[in-house]
Amino acid sequence: MEQHTARTSITARTVPTAPASPPPAAPASPPAASARARADAPARARAAQAGSRTRAQAQGQAARAAQAQAARTQADTRASTRVRSAQAQARASQAQARAAAPPARATSPRVRRPGGALAVAADRLRALPRPRARLTGLGTGALTTVVTVLAGAADSLLFDGPGVFFGLVFVAVCVAAAVYVRPYDLVAAPVAAPIAFAVGITLTADGGDGGLVGRVVGVFTGLALMTGWLYTGTVLAAAIVAVRALRQPSRRRRSRRCSATPRGRSPR
């Protein structure tokens, strides 16, 4: 018994004792927690207001930036529309000006030729627009005859018989007929000239006493006295027709052997 008691005392001496833990804190009382929440509420409200104000400012700045961007886009669109419309108007005005302006003629460089005024006059005559030939052979004869008879009648009424006026009109109508006759009827101009002259003299010559003999004598007298006008008109018409015939391209038809189109082989 005494031994057990001694061991217990030795063990109690050798084993250290653990320090005592502090007592747990007592929970806050409900009145203190509510007082602290009431104290923190204004700060929280101010923080929420500051956050909402910051968000509103950010949204306002974003809206203003979007409005400015839309305004710039609209301004750019309007400017580009104005530029395109101005370009379209300029192109339309240029097209109208080109359509209204006469076509420019290709002018060849002038070459000085010997001859002076005669060469210049010839060049100007070549530069004049050429008349388009439309008269047929029948039209050429009818035109020459009608104009010659009318000139002879007017000359007879004014000067008692065909004279210089008749001859000038005859030469002019012969030249016009030779110029305006179409290429296929070139021979009609020099052939119609003497016929028209004879008809005009016959219808407008002085008949003397009015009988058949007087009419025949008047016709032959007129033909004899005005032979120069007849020759002049006929020769001018023939010369113009000859020049036109020489300037025309050759219209010969090619034979089948000379044709460039390949001919197919006939079946055997």
Image (cartoon, helix red, strand yellow):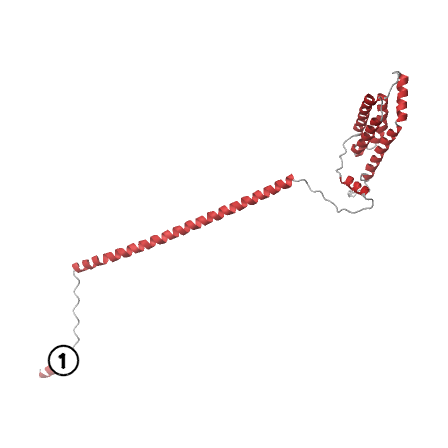
* Along the line of sight, the residue nearer the viewer: 149 or 265: 149
Q: Residue at x 31, y 55 (%)?
A: 51
Q: Residue at horizontal 52%, vertical 45%?
A: 82
Q: Position of residue 128 (x, y in %)?
A: 75, 38
Which residue sits at x=35%, y=53%?
Answer: 57
- In the picture as drawn, the residue positioned furthest to the front comes out as 159
Q: Amino acid at mark 1?
A: Ala
| Residue 18 vertical position relative to residue 207 in the rendered view, above or below | below
- Picture quadrant where residue 144 is located: top right
**Quadrant showing the N terminus:** bottom left
- Rendering quarter of residue 155: top right
Q: Residues within 10 Å of mark 1 (few under 14, many from 20)?
A: few
Q: Residue at x 59, y 43 (%)?
A: 91
Q: Name the image quarter holding the C terminus.
A: top right
Decide if residue 140 is in sight here.
yes
Nearer to the camera, 254 or 171 = 171
The residue where tag 1 is placed is 12
Q: Is residue 178 left or right of residue 12?
A: right
In x, y percent, where is residue 151?
81, 25
Query: Does dot 1 land on a helix, a strand or a loop?
Result: helix
